[in-house]
Amino acid sequence: MSTLELHGVHAGYGKAQVLHDVSLRVGDGSITTLLGANGAGKTTTLRAVSGLVRFTGQILLDGRQVPAAPDAVARLGVAHVPQGRGTIGRLSVDDNLHAGALLRRDRAQVRADLRRLRELFPVLAERARSQAAGLSGGEQQMLAIARALMGRPSLLLLDEPSLGLAPLVTKEVFVLLPRLRDEWALTVLVVEQNADLALRVADHAVVLESGRVALAGTAAEIAGHDEIRRAYLGN
Amino acid sequence: MNLVQQILDGLSSGSVYATLALALVLVHQSTGIVNFAQGQMAVISTYVAWTLYDAGVPVWAAIVAAIAGSLVAGALAERLLIRRFEKGEPLAAIVVTVGLLISINGVVSLIWGTVLKQFPSAFPRGGVGSGNGGTIGFGTLGTIAVLLVVVLALGWLFRHTRLGLAFRAVAANPESSALLGLPVGRLLMLGWGLAAAVGALAGCLVAPKLYLAPEMMDSVLTYALAAAVLGGLNSAIGTVLAAWFIGVVENLAGTYISFVGGDMKIAVPLVLMILILLFKPEGVFGHKEVRRV
C-alpha cells in the first residue's frame, strides 16, 4: 500500500497543455476513482504519475518525488494498466505474466503468486500457451491486471478497464477491485467513464473538468452530488 | 567435385549467410528496423581482427576480441545514433542505416586501404574424405558447426532465460515493457550489441574464403537479406533453413545450370526474395500476427 499525492501538477503534450494545477491525494489502501468527460485529463494524470508524460509540479509516492523514467517508477511499486490494456499480443499468456515479474528475485513467491492468480482467473491457466492477442477483451483485461499484480505493486493505476467490454464483464472487473485491494495490499487509482459503477466500489472520487480538479470527496458525497448526476449519470 | 561436396559447400556458405541474417533478425526483432549497415559493421570488425592477427595475436584470440569489441560498438551505435530515430518513421531509421553503411565503407577504405588482404582461417587445413576421392574441408564443417552453436545459444537465450523474455517483451511493445519496469533503452542497446557480435562472427567466417576487402560483405548481405525475408524476419530456425537453402541452390545452380554459372548465381536469392514477397510476405516460416478487433 502506498500514498500518492499530486501538488500543482501541470502536464501536456508539446504545446497542448492538458493538466492545469492538479492536486489530489490517493490515500493508503483506498480505492479512488478519477472521473471526468473525454479529454478532461484523466489518462494524462495517470501517464504523468508513471513517467510517460513530462510534468511540472510535484508527484509524491509515500512522500518522495517519483522519478522521471517509466521503468524507474515501476520499480518503486507502481503498476499502470494502460488504456487498451497494454498486454503484449505476440507473447503467450504465460510469457505476459512472467514478464510482469521479471524484476523480482523471490522466485518461490513468484510461483505462489502465479498460482493464486490462475485460481482467481482460471482462463489464464486454460489459455496459458495461447497468444495474448487471441484472448477476448475481458480476458485481456484480466491478463493485464494479473500481469500488473505479478510485479507485487503497492499502487495500481487502472485506465478505463471498462473500455470495449460488455457491461456484465465490466461489472465483474469492478466488483473484483475491493477484493484485490485487500488480498494484494494495494492502493488503487482507477480512471473511469462509467461513473455509476466506479462510485459503487470506490472509497473516494476526484472529478476532473478540462484539466482541473472540479470536485473531490468520498464516493458517497460525489455520488449524491447533483452536478455529477447531470454531467455523468444523465439525469 | 562431387555432389556431396557441392551440397556441403552450399551449406557452409549458407551458414555464413545465416549468421549475418540472424544479426539482421535480432535487430529487426528488437527495434523493428532492417539494418542495412549490418554487413559493413561486420567488415570493420573483421578488419579489427585482421589487425590484431597481423600484430601477432593468435587468430582465435583476435576473432574473439573483435567479437567482444563489436558487442560494445554495436550497443554504442544504437545509443548514440539509432536511438534518435527509433520513435519516428521506420523509413528514416532505415535510411540512417544506409548512411552508416556508406560511412563505414569510407572509414574502412581510409584506414586499411582497398588492397585485398588475406585473412587466415580459424580452422585447421585439410579435411575428411567424401568418397569419389573428394575431400570436405575442416573449414566447411567448422563453419556449419559454429552456426549451429550460435543458433542453439540464441534460441536458448530467447526462449529460456529472463533476459530473453525481456528482449521479446521490449521488441513487441516498448511502452508496455517500460511500465513493467524493464530498462527498455539498455535492452535495445544490448540487442544491437549482440547483433554486431554475431555479424562480426559472420565476417570472420567468410573472410578466409573471399579475401578481406571493404566490399567483402556486400554479396553476403544480399543473401542474408533474402534468407531473413524467406524466414519471415522473426524466426531463427526459419532463417537458418532459408539461408542453407539459398546457399545450396546457389551452389548447385552455379555448377549444374550452365546459363546461371558463377556470375549469375547472385540472382538466385533475389528471384527467391521477390517470389516470397509476392506470394507469402510473412515469410515461409514467419508467423502471422494474431489480431483481434
Image: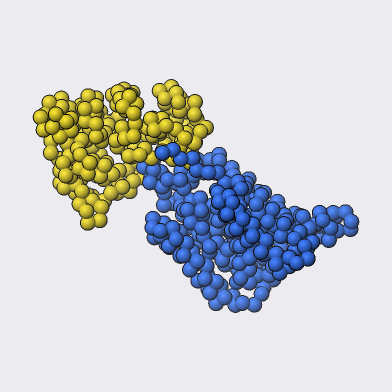
Residue B249, quarter of the rendered image: bottom right
Q: Tell me if A82 is positioned left or right of B93 in this view.
A: left
Q: Quadrant of the N terminus of chain B?
A: bottom right
Residue drawn at x 81%, y 60% as measured from the top left: B126
Color style of the picture: by chain
Q: Tell me if A178 is positioned left or right of A125 in this view.
A: left
Q: Tell me if A159 is positioned left or right of A113 in this view.
A: left
Chain with yellow colouring: A
Residue drawn at x 65%, y 54% as measured from the top left: B243
Colour assigned to chain B in the rendering is blue
For residue B236, say whether it is visible.
Answer: no
Q: Quadrant of the C terminus of chain B?
A: top left
Residue A41, quarter of the rendered image: top left
The extreme front residue here reads B279
Nearer the observer, A85 or B119: A85
Residue drawn at x 63%, y 65% as measured from the top left: B219
Q: Tell me if A212 is positioned left or right of B204 in this view.
A: left
A179 in relation to B14, above or below? above
Q: How many numbered marks have been drawn onto this rendered protein structure? A: 0
Nearer the observer, B178 or B172: B172
